Image: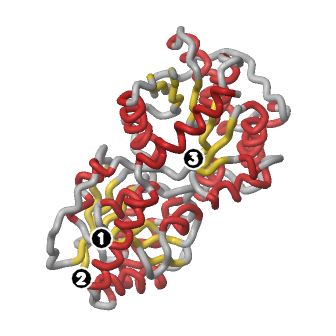
Amino acid sequence: MNILQALFFPPEQPGGVSSMVPYIQERFNKMNWQMELFSLPKRIRGKGQENIVFDTFDVKSFEDSPIIDKYLQTYRDYIWWTRMRINKSYDLIHAHHPIAGLVMKQLFPDTPVLMTIHSSYEQELILNGKIEAGGPEHRFLTSIYRELETKMDRLMTVSQSFRSYLSPYLQQPEQVKVIANGFDEKRFRPISHESQVTQLITVCRLVPAKGLDILLKACAELKKRGNPFVLHIIGDGPIRKELEQLAVELDLYDEIIFYGYMLHPEEFMPFFDIFVLPSRAEAFGSVFAEAALCWLALVGTNVGGIAEQIEDGVNGLLVPPEDPIALCEALEKLISDPIYRYNMARSAWDKAKKDYSLQRVISQLKQVYSEAKKQ
């Protein structure tokens, strides 16, 4: 079978999708299933000129919003680039972004197109203060889900909680198949080490949705209570300067290191002790599984896919979002008791090896691909 994986971001970009799909491609190619990757380069902007029509709603009612206009132009650019670059047919296309899925179905209507919805762009925009809940951008982006349901040959997503999130926007949400992300275990090599001072690490894009302001406030409380630690922040984004300023205001300058963007943070993570990320929303949260495979103790918020990965007090600790004191107390529990921390990390590693192996994803996708090809 000849399969195209249609991404939005190039595979070298950070994130769960980009870090997983190239390894899926490698495994399938070894099984003699031909698989190629396709994405829109960042340099392609403003090239597409085609009129866009959706079947399930009138896009003209959403004009005059810069965010929607940019989304639609990106849609046009994806059409332009796809026409330019793809001159062969495929047995099946698996898209990983709504624009990729809709464009592929438009240009290759006779080819089965499957779509995995990995995250909620509208939730991210709301949490990052870019749009208002219930506003035109929110309504436009949630309308896309019904369009996908109508046009895709199969819809998938990455967690039960995110399927529940999608439910109000779909007619048959029970038809959405859940395939959690998986990770190539060979990428992760836990390293035995002893830290004189507990080393905390977080890896994410520096945007409000990730709750790093809450993390810094929790760390200020940790310091106030006399708990020694160092927090390592890997990632970059629009609020980096704000976070650096907040660290200074909270007297955390000596306890925090900002590293910026790093392509393969999993090579760095095994040298630390606790992974913490107090996201305000998360469809899956791939970085938690990656940290678990590095044998780190996990602390996350009780939201979305994080709560499906962590059973509180068994393989990590869950806290409510927006609660720096609860987050501080969870971190304090792990910092003050290395044996407890080790047991949490071991349990997290056991679960990640069992539930988030890449081989499990390969087996599930093989079945889905075979079923789609027969239809």
Q: Nearer the viewer, residue 39 or 178?
A: 178
Rendered location of residue 167, percent (x, y) = 76, 54
- Residue that badge 3 annotates: 118
Rendered location of residue 87, percent (x, y) = 53, 8
Q: Nearer the viewer, residue 286 or 123?
A: 286
Q: Residues within 10 Å of mark 3 (few under 14, many from 20)?
A: many
* Quarter containing the C terminus: top right
- Residue that badge 2 annotates: 228
Q: Nearer the viewer, residue 97 or 139?
A: 97
Task: Mark 2 or mark 3: name the one nearer the start of the chain.
Answer: 3
* Disc 3 residue type (three-letter): His
Badge 2 element? loop
Q: Residue at x 64, y 22 (%)?
A: 76
Is residue 332 rendered to the left or right of residue 65? left
* Disc 2 residue type (three-letter): Pro
Q: Quadrant of residue 92?
A: top right
Q: Are marks 2 and 3 in contact (CB under 8 Å)?
A: no
Is residue 162 rendered to the left or right of residue 260? right
Nearer to us: label 3 or label 1: 3
Give the numbered dot on residue 200.
1
* Disc 1 residue type (three-letter): Leu
Q: How is the image coloured?
A: secondary structure
User: Can residue 70 be seen from the camera position used here?
Assistant: no
Q: Residue furthest bottom?
A: 225
Q: Residues within 10 Å of mark 1 (few under 14, many from 20)?
A: many
Q: Are marks 2 and 1 in contact (CB under 8 Å)?
A: no
Rendered location of residue 41, percent (x, y) = 45, 25
Q: Are marks 3 and 1 in contact (CB under 8 Å)?
A: no
Q: Nearer the viewer, residue 290 or 214?
A: 290
Mark 3 to mark 1 CA distance (whole Å): 27 Å
Mark 2 to mark 3 CA distance (whole Å): 37 Å
